[in-house]
Amino acid sequence: MKNNKNARVTIKDIAKYTGYSIATVSRVLNDSGVFYSQETFKKIKKAIEDLKYQPDAIARGLKTKKTFNIAFLEPWTSEFFSEIFLGIQDTANQAGYSVAIFSSNFDKSQEEKNISSILSNRFDGVIISSAILNKENINKLISHNIPVVIIEKFIDLKEIPAISIKNLEISKKAVKYLMELGHKKIGFMGEPLEVGRVDSRFRGYSKALEEGGFGFNQEYIFVNENFRGEDYARSFKHIIENIEKIKKCTAIFITSDKIAIILIKALKNAGLSVPRDISVIGFDGLEISKYISPSLTTILQPRYEMGSRAMGMILKIINGAKPENIELKAELVIGESTAPPK
Amino acid sequence: MKNNKNARVTIKDIAKYTGYSIATVSRVLNDSGVFYSQETFKKIKKAIEDLKYQPDAIARGLKTKKTFNIAFLEPWTSEFFSEIFLGIQDTANQAGYSVAIFSSNFDKSQEEKNISSILSNRFDGVIISSAILNKENINKLISHNIPVVIIEKFIDLKEIPAISIKNLEISKKAVKYLMELGHKKIGFMGEPLEVGRVDSRFRGYSKALEEGGFGFNQEYIFVNENFRGEDYARSFKHIIENIEKIKKCTAIFITSDKIAIILIKALKNAGLSVPRDISVIGFDGLEISKYISPSLTTILQPRYEMGSRAMGMILKIINGAKPENIELKAELVIGESTAPPK
DNA sequence: TTGTAGGCGTTATCAC
DNA sequence: GTGATAACGCCTACAA
């Protein structure tokens, strides 16, 4: 039963090999009930083994309209997304789905291509944890009726279920912690407010100051385009250029561990030490943040859970339900980068 | 021309909408020559716009046996793989291919699932930059005649084209650099030799010692299972437990930046300072390594190029050629973590 | 319990 | 230049 070339083994080959019809083979393949005898089942299963048959998801999908593939959109394959992805994958696998990652590399036209590929390949669902650079793209997905869930990003479409952490609450808590240490000149540093959930983090920061009876000081706000993306050097340069202003703070609350790490380096370059001269709080709770010196005080996001819950939402939508938005709790982890002001 | 439900717009709809046959529509779609008039072309193009038609890659793939999808296998979505992926993607896109990432999360059964999904979904090529935990899996791919290329991993199958850096050469150079600084007690730390290309790195280390007239000292070798994977805590613990032995070295060459960073922290915990007490050289050249203190002396791998060349090899195989193995040059980047012994 | 046949959305081989 | 029509590999009524 050798095919001349390397032609795929199909359901037809199994049928010929066993003497059954393709219909029966298909039934066994799909285990879809009891419409075959034990013997038939065994014989066909054996043939599948013998011939190393691999079902053709493409042909199947064409017929069934289901591919059992989920797409995960991230901006960059960084450590931050690893555990989110792990959570997604575990939950997906359990339900019989596979998940493929699409990275936009912060590029608009790449995002376009990814969306187009997802559409063409009929993914059954899309989990987005990447800034959508072009809103049109998301409309394409929903207009094709593909279930979409957003993780920790702001998108002003109420129909799309979202999952995020309690950014405002935890940010407030972090800043209050700084206040409790005795800090009065507390800065805020991060990407532009429209990125991710930076706006909520900023509101948490403001709220904490307000509730603490502190005035809001524009001088202490370091929100800048240069912090966007993955260009470490650009962030570093920007900090160096603004070091004099930054030095006026005794503590800074930052929207990511990455920027926090860069800041600490820049301060050191300028002859300042963390936390002796300035305290620093990051955001994300990356593993690496525990192993640098000083280790970071940071906000740990429950990444695995964010992923698995997001996938759970997708499954709900696939099953016709309408999931509620979810807000998970984050945790303030105290490291070595914060101390009372001198 | 509204379909009752959200049915996909098909080539048939376009045909009906324009009055042409599906055959003609297909021709225009594929731009496959000049077998239609300008007018036909325009009309059909317009209809595609009007109806927001998205070609169905699934149906197309069923017929053509080509999906124009490439799979990239990584063990974990870390920063290290970002640029490799970027290189792959750029080259793939240029040739009209999309690439999806599959992460095994260091899990054998997940790897199994990924391979199975890739097979079922008929990916046109697979780029592997993940340890293959089960060799059977790779055989599945080649027995299905799917082009495979390996990046920076050791796999004992001569038929599979591989791309890597000159591990031996650059490792030797790094260790010689330590010797030039005056170090005599130089250690080697990393994952078991069968991981990735650790064996070549170890050979480079040994060779440098040998050529320098140094004896090889088993006491200075810290190769251990605990350095495998992404468990920072486990690596840290292992180092702490062996700190007395490690202290006997005045310099250590390490197989990854990640372990190097953890080592520096552990040494600090033990009251030792890098590079004052011990010099450290990492491997990979991650961005973050420049922004910790001390910044790492490390070996920079040309990640983007590794990716784009790997994709180039896949394209060659698809076109029927047999690509040669490639060895790229890496670069020793001097940071703050190395100094003469005290 | 099993087989026949039509169709999923395309492409490709024929005719016209 | 354009239009029927048969595949591609699978699923699924409908028959038997």
Image (cartoon, coloured by chain):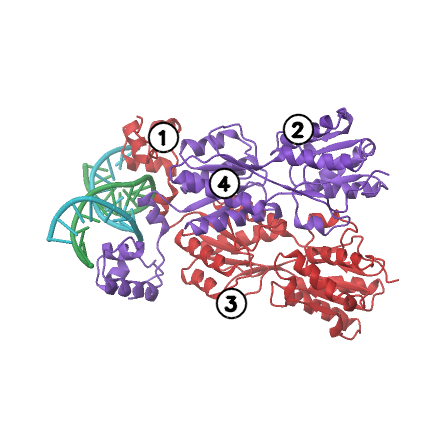
Chain colours: A purple, B red, C green, D cyan
Residue A149, percent across and down?
A: 49, 37
Residue B52, percent across and down?
A: 39, 30
Residue B318, percent across and down?
A: 45, 54
Residue type marked 1: Phe
C-alpha span from label 2 to label 4 = 26 Å
The answer to whether the residue labelled 3 contacts the one labelled 2, judged by CB atoms less than 8 Å apart, is no
**Residue A37 quadrant:** bottom left
Closer to the camera: disc 4 or disc 3?
4
Query: At numbered mark 4, what does the secondary structure look like: helix, strand or loop?
Result: strand
Q: Evaluate whether label 4 is on the same chain as label 3.
A: no
Residue highlighted by disc 4: A127
Residue highlighted by disc 2: A203
**Any mark on residue B189, and which?**
none
Closer to the camera: disc 4 or disc 1?
4
The answer to whether the residue labelled 3 contacts the one labelled 1, judged by CB atoms less than 8 Å apart, is no
Residue B33 seen in this snapshot:
no
C-alpha span from label 4 to label 1 = 37 Å
C-alpha span from label 4 to label 3 = 37 Å
- The chain letter under disc 3 is B
Query: At numbered mark 2, what does the secondary structure look like: helix, strand or loop?
Result: helix
Q: Nearer the viewer, residue A315 or B206?
A: A315
Q: Which of A29 and A90 is in front in this view?
A: A90
Q: Nearer the viewer, residue B187 or B227?
A: B227
Residue A260 seen in this snapshot:
yes
Residue highlighted by disc 1: B41
Q: Residue at x 40, y 28 (%)?
A: B49
Residue highlighted by disc 3: B157
Dot 3 or dot 1: first in sequence order is 1
